[in-house]
Amino acid sequence: MKLSVALIGEDMIDLSLFGKLLNPATFSYKTYSYSGLHDVESDGAAIIFLFSPNDSRKLEEAVDYLGRGANGKRFLVIVSSLASFKLLGGRTKELCSDHLVFPSDNTSVEKRLDLYQRVLTVQKFNSGSEGLTEIQNRMLELEEQNVAKDKFFAIIAHDLKNPFTGFLGFSEYIAKYYDEITKDDLGDFSLRMYESAQHVYNLIENLLAWSKLRTGNMEFEPIPFDMEETIKRVLKLCESMILKKEINLVNSTKGKLEVFADANMIDTVFRNVVTNALKFTPKGGVVHIGYFLEEEYIIIFVADSGIGISEERQKKMFKLGYRVSRDGTDGESGSGLGLILSKEFMLKNGGDLYFESNEKNGTKFYLKIPRLL
């Protein structure tokens, strides 16, 4: 028997997205507005998720109304901030104290899940251990989606804006003073505009790929291919950056490196790793690309003589919600999204992406790719 879930809020799109996190084999759900509380009552939902409205009075009235009608089969959850909970009157809190969950914005995912579990246990929610685990898993997915959404908007607001600012500045200067600009200056401006455009393009490519992966719309087609061809293609794309920073590139990959994976995903991963190595290597530094075999895998490594990664940044390197990116040795900016995306791509292909680094002593990334046996 499916459990009936009521989702109450003002943004029906957000509610619908939340509802899709619920397993259709276990839960059925309906979305309601704050003006439709009577419908919630008559539909007899087993679980109620109450999202904070813009008007705190609506929250007070809804909690009071639903709390009065609560019985052993009803469970009321407020998915909001602690600040929203504090807006409720003491009488309402007392009436509904056994039915409220009010995680703080700063509460970790683990602590939130523990809180949900403890409250569900106290309520003796008759869904069995399987149903409880399902709720926990879906809550974790929701938290991850929220973090992902916040990260997405942070990137749009900051990392996409910055290169456009430079691009617009240079193009405006050229438009105003084109008859006074020397040929050398024009060449310099053109190069900087190209670099800004290239940065935006790479960022958009990563954003689109990440969005498709998160929404389940990313095509996954593992095929046999030669990794050596991918290496050559990516290095060709990075040629201008290599020349500009006078990087000593050592490529010790020779002959065919036959792997079995999604070629587009691996291309993206290798491009992100190489770009990062070049970004954080100072002028005249060294980037070494090589490989070795490990049982059923080919391990491609990209080692640089750059600035390295601090222990604190290493702990957060592949985690959404943390800003670990910093400017490169030549002022290059970045979002940090590329490595997060790359890690997910490698895991999806049955491989892995990992690294070793010491601050000020360079970094070495490893792409673990399934071999074609």
Image (cartoon, rainbow, N blue to C red):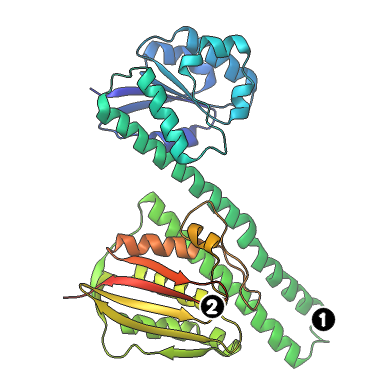
**From the image, which quarter does the N terminus lie in?**
top left
* Location of residue 331 (image quadrant): bottom right
Neighbourhood count class around disc 1 (C-alpha, 10 Å): few under 14, some 14–19, many 20 upward: few
Image x and y of residue 213, in percent? 38, 55
Q: Can residue 59 be seen here?
A: yes
**Left or right for 150, reference 162:** left
**Which of the 4 image quadrants contains residue 266?**
bottom left
Check the picture and name the quadrant holding the C terminus: bottom left
Disc number placed over residue 177 in the picture, else none: 1
Does residue 354 lie above or below 218 as drawn?
Answer: below
Label 2 sits on what residue type? Asn
Specify whether residue 263 is in view: no
Q: Position of residue 298 (x, y in %)?
A: 27, 76
Q: Residue at x 48, y 65 (%)?
A: 338
Tally of marks: 2
> Which residue is pictured at 75% across the width and 71% down the height?
169
Residue closer to the observer: 322 or 305: 305
Residue occupied by mark 2: 361
Please tell me how crowded label 2 is: few (under 14), some (14-19), or many (20+) other residues with Cα within 10 Å: few
Query: Which sits earlier in the primary sequence, circle 1 or circle 2?
Result: 1
Query: Is residue 32 shown above or below 297?
Result: above
Give the residue at x 29% y 71%.
369
Please state if 167 lies on the left or on the right of 215 as rendered.
Answer: right
* Nearer to us in this view, 171 or 67: 67
Mark 1 vs mark 2, foreground winner is 2
SS class of the residue under badge 2?
loop
Which picture quadrant has residue 57? top right
Q: Is residue 301 above or below residue 22?
A: below
Q: Position of residue 204 (x, y in %)?
A: 52, 64
Cα gap from disc 1 to disc 2, whole angstroms: 44 Å
Of the residues shown, which amino acid type is indicated by label 1? Tyr
> In the rendered view, does 136 fall on the left or right side of 235?
left
